[in-house]
């Protein structure tokens, strides 16, 4: 199961006597959701950067091959 920030924000715990402080739990869930959003954004940024670097590397390899063939 893939957990999203909204899954965390919208999760409802059942009420019980002598349970946890609802505000404290809600605050923690919001902090957790924000942290997950940041990680997902960073992951997307790094994936895009990796794709760009792969393209650059492929171009450099092609250039290297052309130079290698020119010296033959």
Image (cartoon, rainbow, N blue to C red):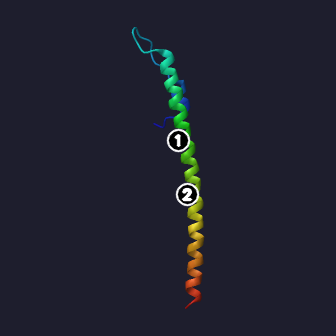
> CB under 8 Å between callouts 2 and 1?
no
| Residue plotted at (48% across, 19% down) | 24
Residue 30 sits in which quadrant? Answer: top right
- Secondary structure beneath disc 1? helix
Q: Residue furthest left?
A: 18
Q: Which mark is residue 14?
A: none
| Residue plotted at (51% across, 17% down) | 23
Q: Position of 59 compared to 18: left or right?
A: right
Position in image of residue 16 (x %, y %): 41, 10
Q: Is residue 18 above or below residue 13?
A: above
Residue 65 sits in which quadrant? Answer: bottom right
Viewport quadrant of the N terminus: top left
Position in image of residue 66 (x %, y %): 59, 82
Label 2 neighbour load within 10 Å: few <14, some 14-19, many 20+: few
Q: Can you identify the residue that label 2 sits on?
A: 50
The total number of labels drawn is: 2
Position in image of residue 14 (x %, y %): 44, 15
Q: Nearer the viewer, residue 30 or 69?
A: 30
- Secondary structure beneath disc 2? helix
Viewport quadrant of the C terminus: bottom right
Q: CA distance from mark 2 to mark 1?
A: 16 Å
Q: Nearer the viewer, residue 18 or 16?
A: 18
Residue 54 sits in which quadrant? Answer: bottom right
Label 1 neighbour load within 10 Å: few <14, some 14-19, many 20+: few
Q: Is residue 55 above or below residue 8?
A: below
Q: Residue furthest top?
A: 17
Q: Is residue 10 above or below residue 54?
A: above
Position in image of residue 32 (x %, y %): 50, 31
| Residue plotted at (52% across, 35% down) | 35
Q: Can you identify the residue that label 1 sits on?
A: 39
């Amino acid at each position: 199961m893939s957990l999203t920030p909204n899954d965390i924000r919208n999760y409802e715990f059942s009420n019980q006597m002598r349970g946890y402080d609802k505000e404290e739990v809600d605050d923690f869930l919001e902090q957790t959701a924000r942290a997950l959003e940041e990680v997902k954004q960073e992951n997307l940024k790094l994936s895009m950067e990796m794709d760009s670097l792969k393209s650059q590397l492929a171009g450099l390899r092609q250039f290297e091959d052309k130079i290698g063939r020119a010296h033959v």
